[in-house]
């Protein structure tokens, strides 16, 4: 696949996970909604980076990913803070004993939607 095809594939995954996050939020599955929102955002980040730089690092440490997004240019840098907020909810939604509360899950889904919209805009340009 070409880099652009890879970017489009990541955008499609971002949309799928965003839709799953929305369904989970509606079902009051707050950890699942937040986790899916984070995965959606990671795929949006990959789509943006692939389109704008031709590469996206596959990092085991997702905490390094916001810097990659920032380096992708103005569109990526504008989403860096949103992406960081989502990544900060990752551990709680996936690994910690404490669960994500409704308001945080709702925020996570909204942030993932912002990331997806940004990625879609980048790929459409």
Image: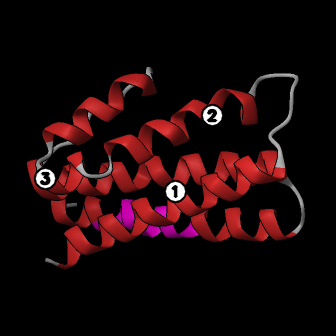
Residue 12 percent across, percent down from the top left: 44, 69
Where does the image place residue 96, in percent across and percent down from the top left? 79, 22
Residue that numbered label 3 is attached to: 74
For label 1, the SS is: helix
Which disc is residue 90 wearing? 2
- Residue nearest the observer in this picture, 65 or 3: 65
The image shows residue 102 at horizontal and vertical percentages of: 82, 53
Which residue is drawn at the image coordinates 47% and 51% (left, top)?
Answer: 41
Crowd tier of the residue under label 2, counting other residues whose Cα lies within 10 Å: few below 14, some 14–19, many 20 or above:
many
Q: Residue furthest front?
A: 103
Corner quadrant of residue 29:
bottom right
Is label 3 in a helix, a strand or a loop? helix
* Residue numbers of the magenta segment: 8-16
Which quadrant of the rendered structure holds the N terminus? bottom left
Image location (x, y in percent) of residue 120? 31, 72
Q: Residue at x 77, y 50 (%)?
A: 32
Marks 3 and 1, how far apart in space?
18 Å
Q: Residue at x 62, y 60 (%)?
A: 109
- Position of residue 10 relative to residue 49, above or below, is below
3 left or right of 119? left
Residue occupied by mark 1: 111
Alpha carbon distance from label 1 to label 2? 13 Å
Sequence order check, earlier mark of 3 and 2: 3
């Amino acid at each position: 696949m070409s880099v652009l095809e890879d970017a489009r594939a990541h955008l499609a995954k971002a949309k799928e996970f965003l839709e799953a996050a929305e369904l989970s939020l509606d079902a009051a599955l707050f950890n699942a909604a937040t986790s899916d929102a984070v995965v959606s955002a990671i795929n949006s980040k990959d789509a943006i980076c692939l389109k704008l730089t031709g590469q996206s690092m596959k990092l085991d440490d997702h905490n390094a990913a916001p810097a990659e997004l920032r380096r992708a240019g103005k569109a990526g840098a504008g989403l860096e803070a949103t992406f960081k907020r989502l990544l900060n909810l990752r551990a709680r939604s996936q690994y910690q004993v404490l669960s994500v509360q409704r308001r945080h899950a709702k925020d996570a889904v909204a942030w993932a939607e912002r990331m997806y919209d940004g990625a879609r805009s980048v790929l459409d340009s």
